[in-house]
Image (cartoon, rainbow, N blue to C red):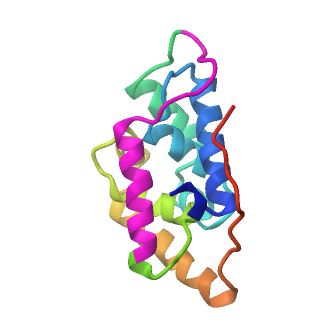
Amino acid sequence: MFERFTADARQAVVLAQEEARALSHNYVGTEHLLLALTRDSGIAGRALTGLDVTRDAVREQVMTIIGPGFNAPMGHIPFTPDAKKVLELAFIMALNIGHNYIGAEHLGLALCADRTSVSGQAMLRCGVATKTAVDRIAELMIEALASGPAPVLEAEFVLSA
């Protein structure tokens, strides 16, 4: 599936790993993906920050909901089942829209559609209904698609530290 990720979606996954390490979590969860997207300058990031879902606000909520880890992880950090579901849902959403690639915007849509995960709880605590976030990302995605061609996919992607 990662071969269909655009550079911005791949960067979001790498940033999610960085966020997990920064919080000393030994897993990459939906909250780390959300934190990564708040650092994105593309469609997903603009939509989230436009809804006041900022990195600082999300980090504060993650610390309240989960708290810090105990030891900074070394090496590979596995995805949680919820994070894997978000990645799969992003793929399904992209296909349903008719896209042959997965961008950060698809990750954002998938995260916003998930109301029960830590990322969904964090967004709700930031005062954002997940439907509002999905609608805003979809609106920005339509605008972006109207203004230019689809992203070019890179041939290789390796998840590593």
**Residue 15 vertical placement versus 101 (above, below):** above
Q: Residue furthest top?
A: 70
Please provide percent x and percent y for residue 109.
44, 63
> Is residue 64 or residue 159 the one in the foreground?
159
| Res 36 seen here | yes
For image coordinates 65% across by 80% down, the residue present is 150
Residue 73 belongs to magenta span: yes
Residue 91, picture quadrant: bottom left
Specify whether 132 is left or right of 148. left
* The image quarter in which residue 141 lies: bottom right
Q: Specify start and end residues of the magenta stretch as a single range.
A: 71-95
Q: Does residue 22 belong to the magenta stretch?
A: no
| Residue 50 seen in the current view | no
Nearer to us in this view, 80 or 137: 80
Q: Main secondary structure of the magenta part?
A: helix
Instruction: Look at 44% across and 42% down and name the residue there.
Output: 30
Q: Residue at x 40, y 52 (%)?
A: 86
Q: Residue 49, position in %: x, y?
A: 59, 56
Name the residue rendered at 56%, 70% in the picture. 101
The extreme left residue here reads: 116
| Residue 155 percent location from the top left of the image | 70, 62
